[in-house]
Image (cartoon, rainbow, N blue to C red):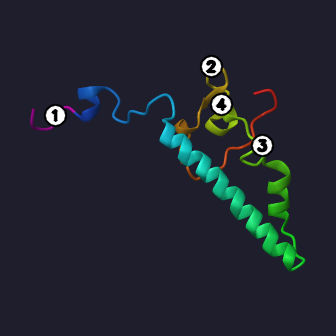
């Protein structure tokens, strides 16, 4: 159909942005790699600052509050807390900008 009332992609096939409900194994591998890379950056900064006898409150807070990649259970690596979802957990790739935001800490008990 042509003209002002032409059907859109949403009308043709349902949702336009289709995301699978679970992470694929390459996505999980990249997520683990990202977690390890962040841990490496924090360790490098901490080591470099400690050589000069300096500390940064943000790095100290990160080390105290955030678990390392090795300390995290798979459930925390790949899912996040969401109070609106049944079961209170949703897959991390449903979070906007999930590759750039660090989601390591969840409420106790969830």
Q: Quadrant of the C terminus?
A: top right
Residue at 85 percent across and 64 percent down: it is 57
Say what secondary structure mark 2 lies in: loop
Residue at 67 percent across and 25 percent down: it is 88
Distance from label 1 to label 4 (Cα)? 38 Å
The picture places residue 4, in percent across and down from the top left corner, at: 15, 37
Say what secondary structure mark 4 lies in: loop
- Examine the structure image and report whether residue 4 is included in the region drawn in magenta: yes
Q: Check contact, mark 1 vs mark 2: CB within 8 A.
A: no
Residue under label 3, please give it.
71
Q: Which mark identifies residue 6?
A: 1
- Residue 98 makes an appearance in the image: no
Residue at 65 percent across and 27 percent down: it is 89
Say what secondary structure mark 1 lies in: loop
Q: Check contact, mark 2 vs mark 4: CB within 8 A.
A: no
Residue under label 4, please give it.
82
Residue 102, above or below 48: above
Residue at 55 percent across and 49 percent down: it is 99
Residue 24, above or below 67: above
Distance from label 3 to label 4 (Cα)? 22 Å
Mark 1 vs 3, N-terminal side: 1
Residue under label 2, please give it.
86
Of all residues, the one furthest to the left in this rendering is: 2
Q: Main secondary structure of the magenta part?
A: loop
The picture places residue 63, in percent across and down from the top left corner, at: 82, 55
Distance from label 2 to label 3 (Cα)? 26 Å
- Residue 50 makes an appearance in the image: yes
Which range of residues does the magenta coloring cover? Answer: 1-7
62 displayed left or right of 32: right
83 displayed left or right of 47: left
């Amino acid at each position: 159909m042509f003209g002002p009332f032409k059907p859109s992609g949403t009308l043709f096939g349902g949702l336009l942005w289709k995301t699978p409900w679970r992470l694929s194994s390459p996505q999980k591998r990249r997520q683990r790699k990202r977690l390890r890379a962040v841990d490496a950056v924090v360790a490098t900064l901490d080591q470099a600052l400690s050589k000069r006898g300096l500390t940064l409150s943000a790095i100290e807070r990160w080390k105290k509050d955030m678990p390392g990649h090795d300390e995290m259970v798979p459930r925390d690596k790949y899912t996040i807390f969401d109070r609106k979802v049944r079961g209170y957990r949703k897959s991390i790739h449903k979070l906007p900008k999930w590759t750039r935001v660090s989601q390591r800490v969840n409420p106790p008990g969830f």
